[in-house]
C-alpha cells in the first residue's frame, strides 16, 4: 500500500503542474472564468476600499482560493485513485 500511495503522490504532482496548466490553457470555460476573474479584480481595485477593508477582502478571497484548491486536489486525487483501481480490476479480468 505504501508504494501505491507514493506512486499516487508522484502521479498527482506530475499531472497537477505542467499537464494541468497546458490543459487549462486550452479549456474554453477556464479561459472565460479567468476573464471574469480579471474583471472582478479590476472592479475591486477601483472600489476605493481602505487598507483594513482590502485586508479583509484579501483574507476572505485567499481562504476561498485555498479551499477551492484543496477541494480540487482531493477530487483529482480521488479520480486518479479510482482510475488506477479500475485499471487494476480490468487487468484482472
Image (cartoon, helix red, strand yellow):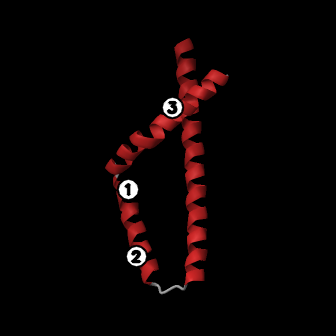
Specify few, some or many for label 2: CA neighbours under 10 Å numbering under 14, 14-19, or 20 or more: few
- Please state, as top left, top right, bottom left or bottom right, where the N terminus lies in the image: top right
Q: In this view, does 72 lie above or below 43?
A: above
Residues at circles 1 and 2 in contact by the CB criterion of under 8 Å: no
Residue 80 falls in image quadrant? top right
Snapshot quadrant of residue 62: bottom right
Residue at image mark 1:
29
Residue occupying the point 56% across, 19% down: 88
50 on left or right of 27: right
**Element under disc 2:** helix
Q: Is residue 93 visible to the viewer in this orientation of the structure?
A: no
Where is residue 3? Give x, y as percent: 62, 22
Residue drawn at point x = 48 percent, y = 87 percent: 48
The numbered disc on residue 11 is 3
Which-is-in-front pick, marks 1 and 3? 3
Task: Answer whether labels 3 and 2 touch (C-beta < 8 Å).
Answer: no
Q: Residue at x 61, y 56 (%)?
A: 67
Mark 1 secondary-structure assignment: helix
Residue at the (56%, 71%) spot, across then down: 58
Which of marks 2 and 3 precedes in the sequence?
A: 3
Mark 1 vs mark 2, CA separation in Å: 20 Å
Disc 1: CA contacts within 10 A as few (<14), some (14-19) or many (>=20): few
Q: In which quarter of the image is residue 78?
A: top right
Contact? badges 1 and 3 (CB < 8 Å): no
- Asked if 7 appears above or below 12 in the picture, the reply is above
Pointer 2 residue = 42
Q: Earlier in the sequence, mark 1 or mark 3?
A: 3
Give residue 66's position: percent from left, percent from top: 58, 57
Amino acid at each position: 500500500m505504501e508504494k501505491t500511495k507514493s506512486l499516487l503522490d508522484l502521479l498527482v504532482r506530475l499531472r497537477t503542474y505542467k499537464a494541468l496548466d497546458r490543459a487549462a490553457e486550452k479549456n474554453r470555460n477556464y479561459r472565460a472564468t479567468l476573464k471574469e476573474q480579471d474583471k472582478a479584480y479590476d472592479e475591486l481595485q477601483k472600489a476605493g476600499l481602505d487598507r483594513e477593508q482590502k485586508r479583509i477582502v484579501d483574507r476572505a478571497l485567499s481562504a476561498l482560493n485555498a479551499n477551492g484548491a484543496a477541494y480540487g486536489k482531493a477530487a483529482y486525487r480521488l479520480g486518479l485513485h479510482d482510475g488506477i483501481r479500475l485499471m487494476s480490476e480490468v487487468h484482472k479480468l
